[in-house]
Image (tube, helix red, strand yellow):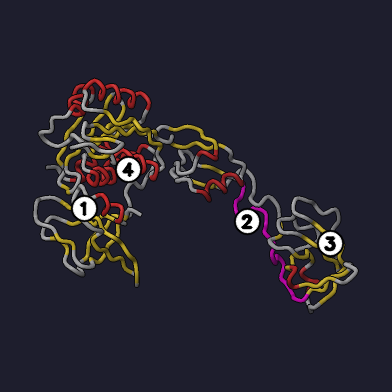
Amino acid sequence: MIPLDEARAYILDRCPVPATEVVDLRETLGLVLSEPVEAIDAVPPFDNTAMDGFALRAADTVGAPIELSIVGTLAAGSVAEKEVGVGEAMRIMTGAPIPSGSDAVVMVERTSVSADDATVTVDVEVPVGNHVRCAGEDLRPGQQVFAAGTVLGPAHVGVLASIGCRSVHVYRRLRVGVLSTGDELVTGVPGPGQIRDSNRDALLAMLEDAGITGADLGLVADDEQAIEQAIAVGVADCDAILTSGGVSMGDFDYVKTVLDRIGDMRWMQVAIRPAKPLAFGLVGETPVFGLPGNPVSSMVAFELFARPALLSMLGHVHLERPRVKAVSDGGLGRHPDGKVHFAKVSVSYADGRFSVSSAGGQGSHQLWAMAAADGLAVIPDGDGIPDGGEVEVLLLR
């Protein structure tokens, strides 16, 4: 068996460097900037009001309440045609530019207008700049908006739109193929000795959760020619391929036969449980991840090996899920076997600390407990974690 870190390093060292492209702004969510972005113009581009109210001279409010003459109305998107003079005020709507001569805004709730709409009584004194959003307050021309390596979320997209950046240089979104093989797998009602294929749907969902486009390469029977054809289609169309099953020592499996013939593969036994058997290699330039067949093992192997590697190909800097220290509620048992165990746990946070408890059955076939888990507790080789003991947890959500 090889250590987890060695297996991860082997995979990461052999993954292709991220490819870049220019993408329309609305297609960038979840992608990573490959070049920094700078502001060309000021944001906001002009002084404007943060409130509906009246633009006036702050000096005129001294000794409030005071009465001022109303000299016009200014809506957002308009420009004042006259200056606000001494003893005057202009009705103004949120977002409208501050008219010349004025230096403050009084919110409408602190004013009252005369019946003939000729004057406004201001109830409060206000300082210069009251409710005024200054030009460049958010961004200045030439200022770096986002650095290369920034993962773009909804707010980032909004900022880029605000500076007129309608396309950006990013690391290209990956397309990853997922292939299931085996005569025992079906998508419909199982017959004798058959089971429903769950790995393909789960892995496609995990790819989507990671911001990666999944490609369903189908469910292929145990036929060497059909498997080779499916892998060839995936290699031609995808940036990487995930298979599940047929990676244990001694398995007689056509996936292994095909990959050994057409690819440069390494078949590993990693000192972890679940997900001990693992394969990784290249078919041409395309990475192929051979994940275990048991459903939980397949998902854990994706989390520990495939997800970080694929994120690296997307240009991400932070490749791992967050890890925290937690207190075990009820204990997490195990027996010494030379492996690090990843236990499915429910995670809670209260009074400034995380706590975890078993999410259910820990067998590699017990998928329901994986759905109930918020994290994977990292349990070193030994007798487990006692009730109240501290354990490191990989947070899944």
Q: For mark 2, does the 10 Å Cα neighbourhood hold few (<14), some (14 to 19), or many (20 or more) residues?
A: few
Q: If you read the primary sequence from the N terminus, does the residue marked by circle 3 or circle 2 appear first?
A: 3
Residue to which mark 1 is pinned: 342
What kind of residue is marked 3? Val
Q: Distance between the residues labelled 4 and 2?
A: 46 Å
Mark toward the viewer: 1 or 2 = 1
Q: Which of 367 and 301 is in front in this view?
A: 367
Residue to which mark 2 is pinned: 137
What kind of residue is marked 1? Phe
What kind of residue is marked 4? Ala
Residue to which mark 4 is pinned: 202
Q: How far apart are marks 3 and 2 (CA)?
A: 23 Å
Mark toward the viewer: 4 or 2 = 4
Q: Which of 236 and 296 is in front in this view?
A: 296
List x then y, in percent, for residue 138.
Answer: 60, 54
Q: Which residue corresponds to the image point at 17% horizontal and 43% vertical from the top-left? A: 276
Q: Is residue 213 visible?
A: yes
List x then y, in percent, for residue 204.
Answer: 35, 39
Under circle 4, the secondary element is helix
Mark toward the viewer: 1 or 3 = 1
Q: For mark 1, does the 10 Å Cα neighbourhood hold few (<14), some (14 to 19), or many (20 or more) residues?
A: many
Residue to which mark 3 is pinned: 84
Residues rendered magenta in the picture = 123-141
